[in-house]
Image: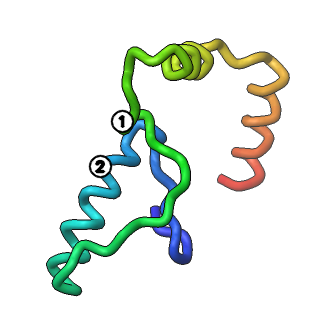
Amino acid sequence: MSVHDSYLIDYTRVGELKRLMAVASEAVAGAALPTAYELFGLDEVDPIAEHVRDYVIWRQTARSEGYLRRLAAHERRTG
């Protein structure tokens, strides 16, 4: 989803977005334009690196009851 000059995208597909934006900008502007993103997507790092494994495990951790209540309230407010 585009937001001003930024995008909201799943952290596992950042590299794909960058590749597609380079292709699109080359088709329109004649050159692949650089992206200014300081962090890497999960699809751009070594999948066996310890910090990556830790992050994937953390993302798979069950959400607490308090988190789920806050999320449900947010979804009721925002649709």
- Color style of the picture: rainbow
At horizontal 41% and vertical 36% (from top left) the residue drawn is 12
State whether residue 3 is above or below residue 27: above
**Residue sticking out furthest to the right:** 66
Along the horizontal axis of the image, is 54 left or right of 31?
Answer: right
Name the residue carrying label 1: 43
Residue 57 percent across, percent down from the top left: 55, 13
At horizontal 41% and vertical 66% (from top left) the residue drawn is 35
- Amino acid at pointer 1: Asp
Name the residue carrying label 2: 16
Residue 66 percent across, percent down from the top left: 84, 23
Residue 11 percent across, percent down from the top left: 47, 40
State whether residue 54 is above or below residue 69: above
Observer-nearest of 8 and 39: 39
Along the horizontal axis of the image, is 33 left or right of 39?
Answer: left
Observer-nearest of 32 and 72: 32
